[in-house]
Amino acid sequence: MKTPLLLAGMCLALAACATTGRLSSAERLDLYRAHAGAPQKDMQFFGTLNGWTELGDSALAVWTRPSEAYLLELTGPCQDLSFAPAIGLTSHMGRVTAAFDKVLVRDPTGGPRLPCFIKTIRALDVKALRAEEKEMRQAQVQEREAPAE
């Protein structure tokens, strides 16, 4: 269920995309939150990620399969998340658990990094998310193709 405030945020994100050509991390986070389910205790994880997207310094989306993704919000800022070449997740017996497991940011220089604790885990509606991202890209192309008056 979308709230009026969330819908207003999505409209602003679409407008920003059409004018700047790129969403900010905060706008992308709003988009992902709009397509996330209720917080859940844990998620299934078999040790490899299909992909990930940083959504600012305290949230990211992780794909466990091409059609299965989760929004992970962290307890606080995660050092160098937006610049990380790779991440990892801790898990126990094939499960990543909120408030227990962590995101591990890989440092390109090999230096130590503090782990980032996962505050919430929310399943993403990947089909709806991709459809909205496609609509936003099409709106951006249409904006660029519109004749100047």
Image (cartoon, grey):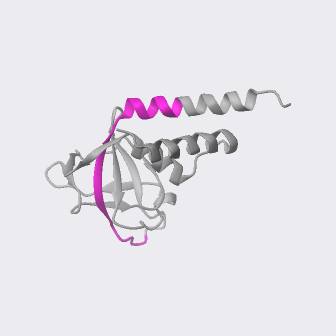
- Residue 92: quarter of image: bottom left
Residue found at x 44% / y 64%: 107
Q: Nearer the viewer, residue 35 or 95?
A: 35
Q: Position of residue 78 (x, y in %)?
A: 41, 65
Q: Which residues are magenta?
A: 111-134
Q: Residue furthest front?
A: 4
Q: Nearer the viewer, residue 131 or 61?
A: 131
Residue 69 relative to residue 28: left or right: left
* Quadrant for the N terminus in the image: top left
Residue found at x 23% / y 46%: 45
Q: Residue furthest left?
A: 93
> Magenta stretch containing residue 74, yes or no?
no
Q: Nearer the viewer, residue 48 or 52?
A: 52
* Quadrant for the C terminus in the image: top right
Q: Position of residue 106 (x, y in %)?
A: 41, 61
- Residue 103: quarter of image: bottom left
Image vertical order of residue 90 relative to residue 9, above or below? below
